[in-house]
Amino acid sequence: MVNLMIDNLQNDLKRVINLYKEKPYLPFWGEIFYILETFKKELNQNTQSDLFLYKTKSSVSVFYRPIDDRFCIALPEFNLLLTQEEFIDNLLQGRFWPN
């Protein structure tokens, strides 16, 4: 049940990001924020391990780290840790989009 909810939230996140690619003039910040908040709430109740969100077009993995409440972009040479707001802002600027 929990895995299904997490899978649904991952798919919702990808769907909203892809919709933003098509229609960047629509206000998506709040929608992405809501999905991530729901995702974090569900995850924090069930696990403390990193959770894979998706791979980017350049095959970089994006994770959520509940231990420090950060989003991790696993670049080849180092990991980039972002707050939720920084992560959303980067998404809306065209960075770290899912494949």
Image (cartoon, grey):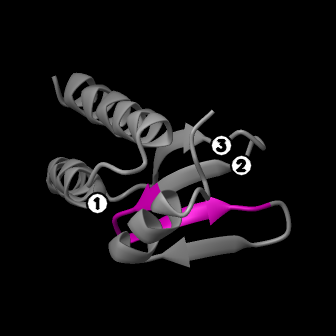
Please give the name of the residue rendered at 47% of the width and 34% of the height, measured from the top-left corner.
22
Q: Are marks 2 and 1 in contact (CB under 8 Å)?
A: no
Q: Amino acid at mark 1?
A: Trp
In the image as oriented, which residue stretches furthest toward the right?
Answer: 77
Query: Where is residue 95 drawn, in percent x and y?
Result: 61, 59
Residue on which disc 3 sits: 56
Give the structural element (helix, strand or loop) at label 1.
helix
* Real-space Cα separation, disc 2 to disc 1, in angstroms: 22 Å
Tell whether 79 sits left or right of 46. right
Q: Nearer the viewer, mark 2 or mark 1?
A: 1
Which region of the structure is painted magenta?
64-75
Question: Which residue is tagged 1?
Answer: 29
The verdict on residue 69 being magenta is: yes
The quadrant of the picture occupied by the C terminus is top right
Contact flag, marks 2 and 3 (Cβ < 8 Å): yes
Secondary structure beneath dot 2 equals loop
Residue closer to the observer: 49 or 25: 25
SS at mark 3? loop
Q: Which residue is mark 2?
A: 60
